[in-house]
């Protein structure tokens, strides 16, 4: 079994120090409501700790570990691994939750199709290692490098251990931000059933779950034990329209929707369309290029177009040509919590094959179905065909079917602007929200399994553990409603069958709806993937037979052999992009046939008790990957305890993260640069072709090289930490840890060509030349370069005692982020500190976060009140505010802190029944207002990376136990 087995029998101060390293141990004792709390603290049960391979009977405070016991999880009303990560302060504020429903994802990502990730210390979900019972599970079939927390069997969880430190020297790749180890029961006899509900006050977003756990056989008397658990969980849909705070129309504060795709269409100025040149506004002489008839002077106003329509704010978005345009609140129309259903099963059979030897078989399986939903399609006219545009053949025509509507639009424009810049008979270019098309849906089904055969025991004074496992995650995404095959859709639009100028109460014709139904792409596969890991591991730990002044020297050695496989496929038609299904977020450029790599690793760890007060732990691991060789990573940690009530701890280690399969093996492609504006930037500063300028007068059209890069190397990291643990009395303890993570040689996708030629000296290596020195290729593949630097402080304090005839426990756990800097090139200095400032994607670096919990127990009742605090930050700036052309009257540059309170009460009704009732977000606090808009996220006026959109909710859980 991986870990340290700790038994502390020394003194109460020793137990207090242990509680600091593992604060949930004290919390568990406080929540149990037993009169023997103090005695229990003196004699702690054996605990397996993540982060080391050596077993010893000493207090292991050298590493900052947070252990969350099952009782604490239940007391907080937490029902899933995702909710647990949102509760932990060491977890970053990133788009890893089911509320992250962005339709505009960063490059090389496939969005959040039902995946919930673990992201520690802002290093990313792919740099945080997730374990189940100390061993790896398969990464998500679509995400490739991220473990889906929804596949973790939460019903059988005994505790969760969070190692807040790098651990590549112990576990290998991905353990840069830390390690989360979900630990289930090892033995169970009896029958337990649990049912729970988490229902919101305002409706929507309810959560239901049920599970049953049963086992029989006694290892001591029968020499075997078998148990299994089955659980079901449903997260119901929550829509923006269900929450008042999700309101994009707050222009006085600086927020207004940046979309002109409205249910009653905006008319656009496009070459060949109805409008010939920009329209001159008779009011002020300004030029107008986007106009909505409803918003013209004397019109009924944009609100007449529907509940979610309003005026487009041209000041905020610095777009004076849209003075008379309308906007639509598609953030409010969007789903802000994905509906997800998950079924999980886990079982374990353990056999005592001898007094000191056990064999066990463990199976885990899950099926997770998510339904992402977005607002209805925006259909935009353009002279170019891009992801959100349709060509002129789709513009609204003049024919017998459209005559009345066409004349209405023409007459409305002519009445205000005059006829000089209008060409009657030309088709109308427009931007329209096709409400009749219905909301867009993507359904993803993920099936994950893991089968493990393991052995553990002792040979003499040495412990051993070995196992072989196979883990598989298969995922497939298919299109639901709201997507249409492009050829049929273009035909429908170009015929005028669909009318983009309807008011509320008016409906599309039956013929138009039938045509949409026939063109529907519902059921078409978007993509599918499979991730597989086959692992053999073995470790041995024990004393070396000689001692230092502080005790016997101990060691652990072991091997880890792993085969990783991955494939990602989809329909061939996806390569056509918009020519196949309009707006479908396919990913054909990342298709991969099944690829694999073998990993061979060996590790060694030494525990050196130098003297009674000082211990050192040295660890090292060498991993060798097929394709790019090996990497060796050491770790050095110490604990110095000069007196019983004071300890110092620290660690230094290096880490690594291997390139993903897509980054390595994605198909390479060469496409010729077809524009006529490129010159050799080594000869022509800026690289802009100009026949009138010497050096810039030679036009070049090299090939652009994109795709995977087999020459990639692993990302590297350096981790440092130093902490102090203080336990001056039996009732109070305190720990504070400083940490730093520097990542180097980070993997980035291709650079922007405009940046490359504008700053040639930095990108010279990406311009590939032939023997004559001419540029023949521009390399925009994945490369290793740049880095990041992150620093922070984490603290944990506990106070226990007696109050009102019962026992109380007060805990403060906080995280302070001091530094978050990045650089594009390894030779560059780090950029500005981004802590406390808005970031559009990935992690939002909040300066301070904490949870403050007060628990009080007496008799059969346990009460817990928790404050969850998330710091404020500098807000996003829309273009008008950024360039200083417009400042709204109620503008505030800062986002407020988000503070919520949770309360729960547990009642041990009898030996067979336990009930827990709770109120999450006790004061029904809305998410703080932010200018963040949908193009950068998942809603408008609130931030999914910080806040829970569900509002106040009521939880009830009943646990029945039968023996």
Image (cartoon, rainbow, N blue to C red):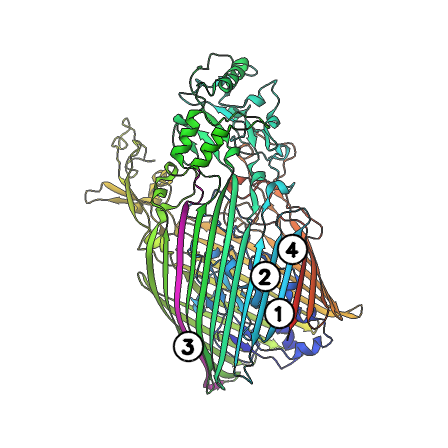
| Residue 65 visible at all | no
Q: Cα distance, mark 3 to mark 2?
A: 31 Å
Determine if the magenta segment contains residue 395: no
Camera-near label (3 vs 2) is: 3
Query: For the point 66% across and 72% down, which residue is it?
Result: 727
> Residue at label 4?
198
Query: Which of the numbered marks, if any, corresponds to residue 59?
Result: none
Residue segment shown in magenta = 520-547
Q: Quickly name the residue at label 3.
A: 557
Question: Which label sits in the foreground, 4 or 1?
Answer: 1
| N-terminal label among 3 and 2 | 3
Q: Which residue is mark 1?
A: 192
Q: Nearer the viewer, mark 3 or mark 4?
A: 4
In the rendered view, does 686 fall on the left or right side of 82? left
User: 1 or 570, which is in the foreground?
Assistant: 570
- How far apart in space, not on screen, are marks 2 and 4 (Cα)? 31 Å
Q: Which mark is residue 794?
A: 2
Q: Pick whichever of labels 3 and 1 is earlier in the sequence.
A: 1
Tally the numbered discs.
4
Query: Element type at marker 4?
Result: strand
| Main secondary-structure element of the magenta-colored stretch | strand
Q: Residue at x 46, y 21 (%)?
A: 401
Q: Earlier in the sequence, mark 2 or mark 4?
A: 4
Report, in whole angstroms, how far the alpha carbon at label 3 lies from the one at label 4: 46 Å
Residue nearer the viewer, 445 or 565? 445
Q: Is residue 283 above or below residue 474?
A: above
Farthest residue in the left direction? 772
In the picture shown, does residue 944 fall above or below 743?
above
Q: Nearer the viewer, mark 2 or mark 1?
A: 1
Whether the residues at callouts 3 and 4 have beta carbons within 8 Å, the answer is: no
């Amino acid at each position: 079994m991986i870990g340290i087995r700790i038994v502390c029998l020394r003194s109460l101060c020793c137990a207090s120090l242990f509680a600091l390293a593992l604060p949930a141990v004290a919390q568990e004792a406080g929540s149990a409501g037993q009169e023997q709390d103090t005695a229990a603290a003196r004699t702690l049960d054996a605990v397996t700790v993540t982060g080391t391979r050596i077993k010893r009977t000493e207090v292991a405070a050298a590493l900052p570990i947070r252990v969350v016991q099952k009782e604490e999880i239940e007391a907080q009303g937490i029902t899933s691994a995702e909710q647990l990560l949102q509760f932990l302060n060491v977890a970053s504020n990133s788009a890893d939750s089911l509320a992250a429903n962005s339709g505009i994802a960063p490059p090389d990502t496939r969005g959040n199709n039902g995946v919930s990730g673990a992201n520690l210390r802002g290093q990313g979900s792919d740099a945080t290692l997730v374990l189940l019972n100390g061993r790896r599970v398969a990464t998500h079939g679509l995400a490739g490098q991220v473990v889906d927390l929804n596949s973790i069997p939460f019903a059988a969880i005994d505790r969760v251990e969070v190692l807040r430190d790098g651990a590549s020297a112990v576990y290998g790749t991905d353990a840069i931000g830390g390690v989360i180890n979900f630990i289930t029961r090892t033995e169970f006899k009896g029958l337990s059933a649990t049912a729970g509900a988490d229902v919101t006050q305002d409706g929507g977003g309810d959560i239901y779950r049920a599970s049953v756990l049963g086992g029989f056989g006694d290892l001591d008397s029968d020499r075997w034990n078998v148990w299994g658990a089955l659980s079901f969980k449903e997260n119901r849909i929550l829509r923006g329209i269900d929450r008042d705070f999700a309101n994009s129309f707050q222009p006085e504060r600086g927020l207004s929707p940046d979309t002109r795709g409205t249910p009653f269409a905006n008319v656009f100025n496009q070459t060949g369309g109805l409008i010939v040149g920009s329209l001159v506004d008779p009011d002020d002489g300004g030029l107008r290029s986007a106009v909505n008839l409803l918003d013209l002077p004397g019109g009924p106003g944009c609100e007449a177009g529907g509940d979610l329509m309003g005026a487009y704010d041209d000041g905020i978005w610095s777009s004076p040509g849209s003075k008379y345009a309308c906007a639509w609140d598609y953030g409010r129309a969007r789903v802000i919590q994905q509906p997800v259903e998950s079924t999980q099963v886990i079982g374990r059979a353990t056999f005592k094959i001898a007094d000191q030897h056990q064999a066990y078989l463990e199976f885990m399986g899950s099926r997770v179905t998510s339904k992402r939903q977005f607002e209805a399609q925006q259909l935009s006219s353009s002279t170019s065909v891009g992801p959100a545009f349709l060509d002129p053949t789709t513009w609204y025509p003049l024919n017998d079917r459209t005559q009345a509507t066409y004349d209405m639009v023409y007459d409305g424009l002519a009445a205000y602007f005059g006829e000089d810049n209008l060409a009657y008979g030309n088709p109308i270019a427009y931007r329209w929200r096709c409400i009749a098309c219905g909301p867009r849906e993507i359904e993803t089904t993920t099936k994950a399994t893991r089968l493990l055969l393991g052995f553990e025991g002792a040979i003499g004074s040495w412990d051993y553990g070995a196992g072989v496992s196979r883990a598989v995650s298969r995922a497939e995404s298919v299109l639901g409603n709201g997507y249409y095959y492009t050829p049929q859709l273009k035909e429908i639009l170009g015929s005028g069958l669909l009318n983009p100028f309807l008011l509320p109460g008016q409906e599309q014709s039956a013929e138009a709806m039938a045509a949409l139904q026939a063109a529907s792409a519902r059921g078409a596969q978007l993509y599918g993937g499979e991730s597989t890991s086959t692992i053999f591991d073995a470790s041995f730990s024990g004393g070396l037979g000689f001692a230092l002044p502080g005790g016997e020297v101990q060691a652990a050695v072991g091997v880890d052999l792993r085969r990783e496989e991955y494939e990602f496929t989809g329909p061939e038609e996806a390569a056509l992009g918009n020519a196949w299904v309009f707006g479908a977020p396919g990913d054909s450029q990342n298709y991969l046939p099944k690829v694999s790599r073998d990993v061979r690793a060996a590790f060694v760890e030494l525990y050196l008790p130098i003297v009674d007060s000082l211990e050192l732990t040295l660890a090292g691991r060498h991993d060798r990957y097929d394709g790019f060789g090996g990497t060796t990573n050491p770790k050095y940690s110490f604990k110095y305890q000069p007196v019983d009530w004071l300890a110092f701890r620290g660690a230094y280690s290096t880490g690594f993260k291997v390139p993903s399969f897509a980054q390595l093996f994605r198909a390479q492609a060469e496409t010729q640069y077809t524009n006529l504006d490129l010159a050799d930037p080594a000869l022509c500063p800026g690289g802009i072709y100009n026949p009138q300028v010497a050096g810039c007068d030679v036009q070049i059209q090299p090939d652009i090289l994109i795709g995977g890069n087999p020459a990639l190397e692993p990302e590297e990291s350096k981790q440092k930490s130093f902490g102090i643990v203080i336990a001056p009395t039996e009732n109070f303890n305190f720990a504070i840890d400083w940490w730093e993570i520097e990542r180097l040689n980070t993997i980035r996708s291709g650079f922007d060509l405009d940046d490359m030629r504008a700053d040639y000296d930095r990108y010279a290596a990406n311009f590939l030349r032939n023997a004559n020195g001419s540029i023949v290729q521009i390399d925009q593949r994945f490369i290793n370069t740049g880095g990041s630097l992150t620093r922070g402080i984490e603290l944990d304090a506990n106070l226990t005692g007696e109050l009102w005839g019962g026992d109380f426990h007060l805990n403060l756990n906080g995280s302070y982020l001091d530094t978050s800097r990045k650089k594009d090139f390894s030779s560059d200095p780090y950029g500005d500190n981004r802590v406390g400032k808005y970031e559009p994607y990935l992690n939002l670096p909040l300066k301070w976060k904490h949870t403050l919990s007060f628990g009080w127990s007496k008799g059969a009742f346990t009460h817990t009140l928790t404050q969850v605090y998330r710091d404020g930050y500098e807000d996003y700036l829309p273009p008008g505010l950024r360039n200083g052309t417009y400042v709204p009257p109620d503008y505030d540059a800062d986002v407020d802190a988000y503070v919520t309170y949770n309360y729960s009460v547990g009642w041990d009704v009898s030996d067979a029944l336990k009930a827990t009732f709770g109120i999450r977000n006790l004061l029904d606090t809305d998410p703080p207002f932010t200018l963040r808009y949908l193009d950068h996220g998942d809603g408008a006026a609130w931030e999914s990376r910080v806040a829970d959109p569900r509002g106040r909710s009521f939880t009830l859980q009943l646990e029945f136990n039968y023996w």
